[in-house]
Amino acid sequence: MSIRTSTTGKLNKRGFTLVEILLVIVLIAIVIALAVPSTRDVLSGDSLKKASRQFIGLERKLRVEAVRDQMDYILCIDVPNAAYWIISSDMTSEKQAEVKKRQQHLPHDVAITDIVDENNKKNSTGESRIIFKKSNICSPAIIHLAYQEDKMTLVINPFLGVTDIRDKYMDMPVNALAQSTL
């Protein structure tokens, strides 16, 4: 048994005082109260950020591979199912169908609200395609993602190889994007 002194300076052989225990409980409660909201924000916003990172990574990868392999690659996106797959311009229709069966999905509960294609058509019900050409130019596109109440807009620039990310739903025409980069 160890001997401690209390806050009054007297020897205490019985352990912790009630005040000390309450102080520790209050400190733990404060730490939990501060940690829970930030942890919740990280967990909820993380799915949307992870989905945007997937698309940004795909865009960079496909641009590099198209130039390196001197072949056009096509990112196919199934909007209602929040899934995607990659095909190349030299694939047969049978091989394309086989690749489509192995499609990948965005993180759970992340939805693709719609995709605005190079013709300014908003697609929210079918399949969209973004072509990455061997000349390092791709089809311009705007991808709108949603997770619960949060929304995100990804703007794929055809010339710069940079995807712009907005933390809200932005309704803008694709041809304004192409004109702003010339």
Image (cartoon, rainbow, N blue to C red):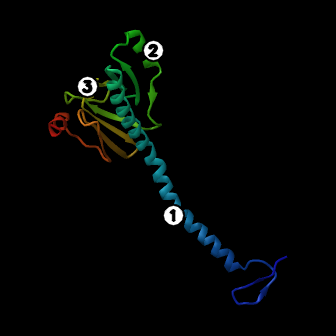
Q: Which residue is mark 3?
A: 135
Which of the two residues, 85 or 67, is positioned nearer the viewer here? Answer: 67
Amino acid marked by disc 1: Leu
Give the Cα separation between the discs numbered 2 and 1: 49 Å
Give the Cα separation between the discs numbered 3 and 1: 51 Å
Which of the two residues, 81 or 96, is positioned nearer the viewer here? Answer: 96
Q: Which residue is mark 2?
A: 98
Q: Is residue 131 left or right of residue 110?
A: left
Q: Quadrant of residue 50?
A: top left
Q: Quadrant of residue 10?
A: bottom right
If the image is split into quadrants, where does the C terminus sit?
top left
Number of marks: 3
Q: Is residue 79 visible?
A: no
Which badge, 3 or 2, comes first in the chain's sequence?
2
The disc at residue 34 is 1
Dot 3: element: loop
Which badge, 3 or 1, comes first in the chain's sequence?
1
Dot 2: element: helix
